[in-house]
Amino acid sequence: MRISAPGLPALLTDGYARFRETGFPRHEGAYRALAEGQEPPVMVISCCDSRVDPEAIFDAGPGELFVVRNVANLVPPCDPGGDYGTGAAIEFAVEGLGVADIVVMGHSGCGGIRAYIESRGAPPGESGAPGFIGKWISTVRGAEARLPTDAPSDGPGLQEAFEYASIRNSLDNLMTFPIVRQAVDDGRLRLHGAHFSIADGLLTVLDPATGNAAVPE
Ligand SMILES: [Zn+2]
């Protein structure tokens, strides 16, 4: 099929050709209906990491997931003077779309979490890592208090402990948004934590009552 996508890398033009050939026809009815508006029931907050694609992991079609992706799948505390991007997505998902569930999905081998661990020891208010990433991942500092007391002090064990603690920290930070807290208190919204293991493709879901990990049956 001839497609017009001048200048794009072959990775994209080839993929787009396949989409026009099979992907779009398969979902054409859904796309036409969705052109009138979206009503996704679930929001997923995931990492930018190329290996952790929510639509692939949950085998979701168009219009099913409202996804925001950022470095290390972080939700900073509600701060009108702080992060606008993630806050705007949360506000739109809850107020504009009325999603019933929000899933914060972390993953194994997260580079953002690793960067935070490597920068530990920096003074409060500073992440120790340079640039935008440094400012952004300073949010992970809030996960320190959520590490298990028996967490390894270094290595892959510490990395995984921080990945889970940061998911719990982001779930707590979600509740600092008044619109989120209100929706949860009203029973209109549920919050979930999950962790994706890249090598084996397994998702571990956090028990909402205990915060402990439990693999879904
Ligand atoms: Zn990541």
Image (cartoon, grey):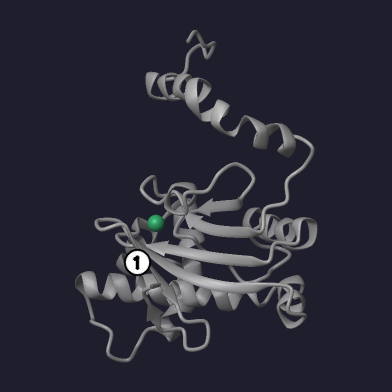
* Residue occupying image coordinates x 56% and y 26%: 25
Q: Tell me if I can see residue 75 in this picture.
A: no
In-image side of 93 versus 168 (left or right): right
Judged from the image, the quadrant occupied by ligand 1 is bottom left
Identify the residue at the far bottom of this view.
Answer: 149
Percent x, y of residue 163 = 37, 70
Q: Horizontal and vertical percent for residue 173?
A: 60, 75
At a point 59% along the width and 52% down the height, the residue shown is: 65
In the image: residue 5, left or right of residue 154: right
x and y percentages locating residue 147 in the rendered image = 38, 83
Image height of 6 relative to 16, above or below: above
Which one is in front, 84 or 213? 213
Secondary-structure class at tag 1: loop
Mark 1, ligand 1, within 8 Å: the answer is: no
Identify which residue is drawn at 23% across, 82% down. Answer: 152
Q: Which residue is mark 1?
A: 119
The residue at the point 62 percent across, 59 percent down is 42
Q: Nearer the viewer, residue 111 or 180?
A: 180
Q: Quadrant of residue 89?
A: bottom right
Q: Nearer the viewer, residue 22 or 42?
A: 22
Quadrant assignment, res 134: bottom left
- 70 with respect to 37 (left or right): left
Picture coordinates of residue 204 (x, y %)? 38, 70
Near-viewer residue (114 or 186): 186
Q: Residue furthest top?
A: 2
**If the image is split into quadrants, where does the C terminus sit?**
bottom left
Above or below for 8 versus 40: above
